[in-house]
Image (cartoon, rainbow, N blue to C red):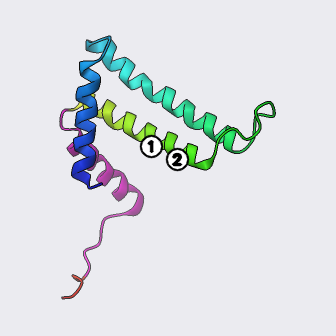
Amino acid sequence: MADEDVWDSIDRLHAWLDAHRAHGGREGLLLRVLKLSEEVGEVAQAVIGATSQNPRKGTSHTWDDVQSELCDVVITALVALRTLAPDAREVFTAHLAGVTERSLGPIEEGPTPGA
């Protein structure tokens, strides 16, 4: 899926959620952001299940389940960001660039391949 398709999907999910929300305004925004906590909890539950850390349940999840739950966290976060910022794509891209530069240093311009 191309970057444009990801953001198109986020916009569509955002619109669908807005059309079906039970609460609007500030309360709706807060609930949408709190949804992240629920999703992160599901990641934790899947990790516990994949590593058999609950003796009562044994192995109840797989690492594929963990991957799926992590994807749900990312989608939920992007939809929450879209709720806060109509220009979520630009906000995210700029923030990612800043984190990348802080972590890895400035991108060095090298020779152009094939030049």
Secondary element under disc 2, as helix, strand or loop, is helix
Give the x, y percent position of residue 44: 60, 36
Instruction: Report the span colored magenta.
Output: 86-110
* Nearer to the camera, 17 or 97: 17
Give the residue displayed 26% in from the left and 79% down from the top.
110
- Structural crowding at the residue carrying mark 2, measured as other residues with C-alpha within 10 Å and reported as few (<14), some (14–19) or many (≥20): some
Q: Is residue 95 magenta-colored?
A: yes
Residue 67: which disc?
Answer: 2
**Extreme residue in the right direction:** 55
Give the residue displayed 56% in from the left and 32% down from the top.
42
User: Badges 2 and 1: C-beta atoms under 8 Å apart?
Assistant: yes
Give the x, y percent position of residue 50: 67, 44
In the image, residue 79 above or below residue 105: above
Secondary element under disc 1, as helix, strand or loop, is helix
Quarter assignment of residue 66: top right
Count of numbered circles in the view: 2
Which quadrant, please, contains the C terminus?
Answer: bottom left
Tag 1 residue: 71
Which quadrant, please, contains the N terminus?
Answer: bottom left
Give the x, y percent position of residue 104: 40, 62
Amino acid under label 1?
Answer: Cys
Amino acid under label 2?
Answer: Gln
Quarter assignment of residue 33: top left
In the rendered structure, the answer to whether residue 74 lies left or right of residue 54 reads left
**Extreme residue in the bottom direction:** 115
Secondary structure mostly seen in the magenta stretch: helix
Q: Is residue 13 magenta-colored?
A: no
